[in-house]
Amino acid sequence: MTVLDDRGRRDRRTGTVVSDKGDKTIRVRFDFLVKHEKYGKFLRRSTTLATHDEKNEAHKGDLVEVVACRRLSKTKCWRLIRVLEHGSHLELGADGLEASPS
């Protein structure tokens, strides 16, 4: 029996890391579709959540799985479970070109 089984079923989501600048904190974006009430067109919506990353293992562009947990700070109530897929670690400069990693 794992730790998650003891505490019941927790909300799990998969998203993309958009920022890893904070210490032990990443920002994860979740995309979803919403159907327009009147016209029926599907609209793309997203939400960005602050997530706790204890080992600083996730980087910008990574696909990650997170789980809901107790409130850790004013904005953090999600915890990183694992990195599913590593993305690009290079940041784009102001002109849109890739900056050399230093």
Image: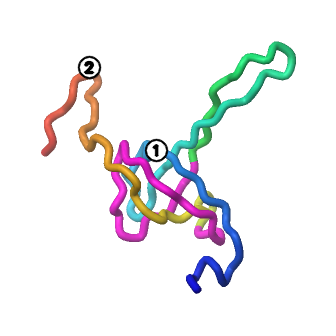
| Location of residue 56 in the rendering, given as x and y in whole percent from the top left corner | 35, 63
Q: Quadrant of residue 58?
A: bottom left
Q: Residues within 10 Å of mark 1 (few under 14, many from 20)?
A: many
Residue at image point 64% right, 31% down: 45
Say how the picture is coloured: rainbow
In the image, 2 versus 101, the foreground residue is 2
From this viewpoint, which residue is outermost toward the front?
Answer: 1
98 or 39, which is in the foreground?
A: 39
Give the CA separation, mark 1 to mark 2: 23 Å
Task: Give yes or no for residue 69 being in the magenta stretch.
Answer: yes
Q: For the point 68% across and 23% down, which residue is it?
A: 43
Which quadrant, please, contains the C terminus? Answer: top left
**Three-letter residue code for mark 1:** Thr
Q: Secondary structure at mark 2?
A: loop
Q: Which residues are magenta?
A: 49-72
Residue at 41% x, 64% y: name it.
24
Identify residue for label 1: 16
| Extreme-right residue of the structure | 38
Image marks 1 and 2: residues in contact by CB distance under 8 Å: no
The crowd level at tag 2 (other Cα within 10 Å; few <14, some 14-19, many 20+) is few
Check the image and report above or below for 26 versus 1.
above
Residue depicted at x 58% and y 37%: 31
Q: Is residue 37 left or right of residue 78?
A: right
Q: Which residue is mark 2?
A: 95
Q: Nearer the viewer, residue 23 or 68?
A: 68
Query: 80 left or right of 70?
Result: left
Going by the numbered disc 2, the residue's amino acid type is Asp
Lateral position of residue 43 relative to residue 72, left or right: right
* 66 left or right of 57 in image: right
Q: Quadrant of the N terminus?
A: bottom right
- Ranked by sequence position, the earlier of labels 1 and 2 is 1
